Image: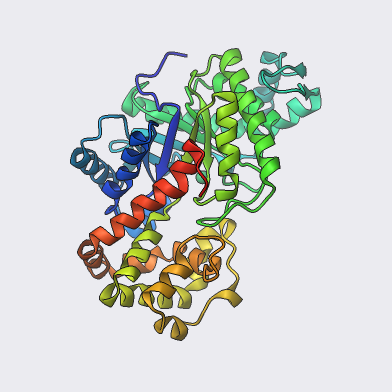
Amino acid sequence: MAASKLKLGRFSVGTGDRFAHQAKAQLQAYVKALESGIEVVPVWNKSNREHVIIGSEPASTRQAADAAVKALNWKLPYYCDADHITTLTVDRFLAPCDFFTIDVADFIGQPAEPAYTEAFVKRHPELHGSIELVGVDQPFEITRETRSATAQKFLAAVKKAGEVYRKIESAKGAGNFIPEVSMDETDRAQSPVELLIILAAIADEGIPVQTIAPKFSGRFNKGVDYVGDAAQFELEMGLDVAAIAYAVRQYSLPDDLKLSVHSGSDKFSIYPAIHATMQRTGAGVHLKTAGTTWLEELIGLAEAGGDGLALAKEIYAEALSHLEELCVPYAAVIDINPAKLPSAEEVRHWTSEQYTSALRHVEDAPAYNDSVRQLLHVGFKIAAKMGPRYINLLEANESVIAKNVTENLFDRHIAPVFLGRSV
Ligand SMILES: [Zn+2]
């Protein structure tokens, strides 16, 4: 496969900015990383789902990113990610984006044409028996049945990824964008053996994939910590990294291919495992966070007091009364306990400190409430509906919000994952 003109680099973090007002504060976190001696490439990601809910255009993400880069005189690469796009949604992302997360999860499990599956099996006699991987004690054992069953389950999805890739390539030209293939928004985790077989198929489709986002075991709910066994995650990630290294050599995939962890933000309990795996293997990672920057906007508004605090309370009250409707698009990735949600009346009496300590993700803080946090996380639609009322307050309270945005991204994500600091 020809080398891409654009390379993502070993370390990168995807960050969301729902209202396109925090790009500069976010970029400041990458500047802090550089000052700490580590190059982390910023990627601004926003899915079609978010654009639809907010009523924004992908070009606005590009404009905000470009403006931030100019303002801070950022010299390293940066990208705009068309997050979780499909053939149906990719069009309006083509011009402003240079990173495409091709989502084919919906096609997993749809049977591929028998001839296509047969050809794949014939083409890959090496995917059978014992496969030795560098840095792994136990070789992968692949039976004929595993290979056929995995091909059956994933080939239609990979073929679809090829179609989307070629659509983007014909618009932008090969090598002018970073392609990612994502399979995380599905019900079952992919095993490292499945990942290897999927990568063989991706290479067959001619996709010069630079990042691959499998679904890992455990739950990756939005904006809250990982639910699962961190040791198991570390084992799985190590095997995935080994499978990727093997696939890069065996199938001539881009040599900087790395895992993309669609974290949904705040997976503090597995950050040490991600850091340790990168240290041990020399692999890189793309850490995709979710739009929790919007929660830092709320924290900043609440901290500011006055009109800011009042609006933050109003957003909570509205979100609470639209609980079900707001949760529908995110049902698979949130876990709210309604019994833990305070009434709107109770919240109306909260001080700045009460609001921020309920919302700010400090796991052992007594007031931290993960149900409040998840409800507000999906509640951005309420703020979007407020339009200029919300935006004007963001602008009026820029400095207090920016401080929270930068600190959150650097101290809670970049520093633990890439510098090995504790959260
Ligand atoms: Zn994802």
| Placement of 2 over or under 101, stated as above or below | above
- Residue drawn 42% across the image and 41% down it: 14
* Residue 259 seen from this side: yes
The one of 383 and 126 positioned closer to us in this rendering: 383
Q: Residue 233: horizontal and vertical position, in percent? A: 66, 41
The colour scheme used to paint the residues is rainbow
Asked whether residue 214 appears in the rendered view, the answer is: no
In the rendered image, residue 95, in percent from the top left (x then y), is placed at 28, 36
Q: Is residue 30 left or right of residue 151?
A: left
Classify 72 as above or below 49: above
Total number of numbered labels?
0
- Dividing the picture into quadrants, the one containing residue 38 is top left
> Where residue 177 appears, x then y in whole percent?
36, 28
Residue at screen point 74% across, 31% down: 149
- Decide which of 163, 316 is in the foreground and name it: 316
In the image, 366 versus 60, the foreground residue is 366
Toward which corner of the image does residue 184 lie, by quadrant?
Answer: top right
Image point (31%, 68%), residue name: 301
Q: Is residue 273 above or below residue 205?
A: below
**300 to the left or right of 361:** left
Query: In x, y percent, where is residue 63?
Result: 23, 44
